[in-house]
Image: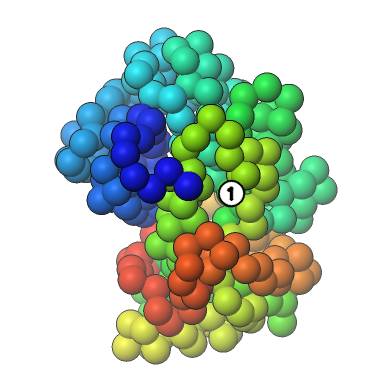
């Protein structure tokens, strides 16, 4: 592992968000030179050894080439689903390779696959396939469900409603995902054991939504609670909220993926790569405001 001396320049996308921002801070602490790339340059953090680049969206090849010029590694943190996520990601990766980037770290989702229950996981699988056929060095980090997600789904009364059934998921904190990503990026020699790897990053235990929300309540000292719905009830409620069909499918399929047990795997990736145990939900360092996710 390249823990000392000069590091290659890393371009970090999503640095205005919870995951990319944490990764950028970790890399800055390790003295890794970074290009922080975003659509809104003013929102990008100012950190030692970093340069803010943009505005650049994934779909804008020219802007991405300008923003990524000088980097040797690209961290591709997916943005919101637009219906053209594969095309946008492919454009960003091709722009990167055109200016000399030779390594990509892609943040995918646990359970990504062509027949995944969760709509967004199918999108991510498509990008994984593109990377596998691109010839560029790459590592895929399949993140488990964020520990913060149930809190973002709560209503003003701090109630989380959905058809999650009694299924379990190994909720993981943003901090642990960022720590794994930093460990991979710090292994920045011409060859890495992580080249071509798919790393499934999870928390230390598989919880039902009721159990996860109870830990959020304990951590925040606020009365969060989970109320189970049927898929039909979930559809009607979200339709009445004015959500689009695409949004409804995305969120109901998220709950159904948990209900089906496909996200319950617990891995050792966090302790193996970071040397520290994975954090429990109750130990998360940040909670979003209720209603942040539709």
Q: Is residue 48 left or right of residue 212?
A: left
Instruction: Report the residue at 66% width, 29% height from top.
Output: 131
Instruction: Report the residue at 39% width, 73% height from top.
Output: 284
Residue 165 location in percent, x, y?
71, 78
Q: Is residue 267 visible?
A: yes
Q: Is residue 72 left or right of residue 126?
A: left
Q: In this view, which residue lies farthest toward the front?
A: 5
Instruction: Report the residue at 66% width, 68% height from top.
Output: 267
Q: Is residue 221 above or below residue 188?
A: below
Residue 154 location in percent, x, y?
44, 72
Q: Is residue 208 above or below residue 135?
A: below
Q: Is residue 176 above or below residue 155?
A: above
Which of the 4 quarters of the picture holds residue 219? bottom left
The residue pinned by badge 1 equals 141
Q: Is residue 236 visible?
A: no
Q: Is residue 155 left or right of residue 119?
A: left
Residue in the foreground of this view, choosing between 131 and 145:
131
Instruction: Report the residue at 21% width, 36% height from top.
Output: 49
Q: Secondary structure at mark 1?
A: strand
Q: Is residue 87 left or right of residue 286?
A: right
User: What is the tally of numbered marks visible in this picture?
Assistant: 1
């Amino acid at each position: 592992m390249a823990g000392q001396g000069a590091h290659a320049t890393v371009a970090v996308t999503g640095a205005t968000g919870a995951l990319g921002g944490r990764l950028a801070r970790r890399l800055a602490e390790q003295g890794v030179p970074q290009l922080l790339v975003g659509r809104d340059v003013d929102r990008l953090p100012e950190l030692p050894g970093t340069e803010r680049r943009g505005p650049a969206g994934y779909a804008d090849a020219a802007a991405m080439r300008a923003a990524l010029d000088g980097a040797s590694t690209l961290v591709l943190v997916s943005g919101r689903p637009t219906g053209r996520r594969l095309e946008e990601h492919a454009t960003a990766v091709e722009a990167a390779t055109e200016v000399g980037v030779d390594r990509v770290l892609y943040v995918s989702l646990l359970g990504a696959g062509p027949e995944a229950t969760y709509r967004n996981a199918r999108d991510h699988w498509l990008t994984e396939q593109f990377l596998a056929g691109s010839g560029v060095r790459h590592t895929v980090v399949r993140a488990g469900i964020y520990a913060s997600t149930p809190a973002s789904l709560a209503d003003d009364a701090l109630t989380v409603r959905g058809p999650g059934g009694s299924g379990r998921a190994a909720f993981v904190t943003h901090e642990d995902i960022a720590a794994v990503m930093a460990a991979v990026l710090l292994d920045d020699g011409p060859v890495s054991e992580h080249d071509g790897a798919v790393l499934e990053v999870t928390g230390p235990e598989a919880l039902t939504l009721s159990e996860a929300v109870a830990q959020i309540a304990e951590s925040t000292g606020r009365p969060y609670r989970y109320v189970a719905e049927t898929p039909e009830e979930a559809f009607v409620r979200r339709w009445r909220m004015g959500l689009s069909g695409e949004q409804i499918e995305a969120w109901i399929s998220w709950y159904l993926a948990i209900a089906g047990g496909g996200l319950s795997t617990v891995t050792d990736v966090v302790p193996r790569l970071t040397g520290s145990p994975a954090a429990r939900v109750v130990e998360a360092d940040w909670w979003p405001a209720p209603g942040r996710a539709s």
